[in-house]
Image (cartoon, helix red, strand yellow):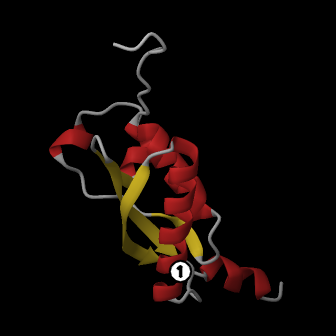
Amino acid sequence: MADNYTGDLVISEDVIATIAINAAKDVEGVAGLGTRPTDFYTSFKVNTENIKHVKVDLSDYDIKLHMYLILSPSAKIQDVSTNVQNAVKAAVQSMTGRVVTKVDITISGIASDLEDDSSNEPS
């Protein structure tokens, strides 16, 4: 082994999910985060709020993500999805130094604009 070996770096799935969520929230048209279907793995994880919204697949060579989002009523689904994919990929690659090969998006819903309507009603 080389003399300059200092150890390994391990980045948790929760950290990668947090990076992805923060990048997605900054994209115009994203109203919130959807909930991914519960699977065997996530049902036993404790204190992993971010993993409820993002599935992270780590390998020795790359990172694959699957995000669940709620969009604003006026959002164009294709445009917002593409912008989220680009933003998430750039943010995760920049912060982790690992290659992101895939960012899948599932639109879980469209946010209700009832709050906006109620604020415009005369009193």
Where on the picture, by quarter, is residue 74?
Answer: bottom right
Place of residue 14 in the rendered image (x, y in percent of width and height, measured from the top left): 43, 39
Q: Nearer the viewer, residue 9 or 73?
A: 9
Compared across the picture, whether 98 is left or right of 118 comes to: left
Compared across the picture, whether 41 is left or right of 11 comes to: left
- Mark 1 residue type: Val
Place of residue 95 in the rendered image (x, y in percent of width and height, measured from the top left): 57, 45
Compared across the picture, whether 86 is left or right of 113 comes to: left
Q: Count how many numbered circles sit on residues in the image.
A: 1
Where on the picture, by quarter, is residue 102?
Answer: bottom left
Q: Nearer the viewer, residue 104 or 102?
A: 102
Q: Which residue is located at x 77 percent, y 88 percent?
A: 121
Direction right: furthest residue: 123
Q: Which residue is located at x 39 percent, y 62 percent?
A: 67
Q: Which residue matches tag 1?
A: 80
Q: Nearer the viewer, residue 99 or 17?
A: 99
Q: Secondary structure at mark 1?
A: helix
Where on the picture, by quarter, is residue 42?
Answer: top left
On the question of residue 15 being in view, the answer is yes
Q: Is residue 107 above or below residue 14?
A: below
Q: Which residue is located at x 47 percent, y 14 percent?
A: 6
Q: Is residue 80 above or below residue 48?
A: below
Place of residue 62 in the rendered image (x, y in percent of width and height, measured from the top left): 34, 50
Q: Nearer the viewer, residue 60 or 28?
A: 60
Direction left: furthest residue: 40
Q: Decide: few, some or many residues near mark 1? Use Cα within 10 Å; few <14, some 14-19, many ≥20.
A: some
Q: Which residue is located at x 41 percent, y 32 percent?
A: 47
Direction top: furthest residue: 3
On the question of residue 66 being in view, the answer is no
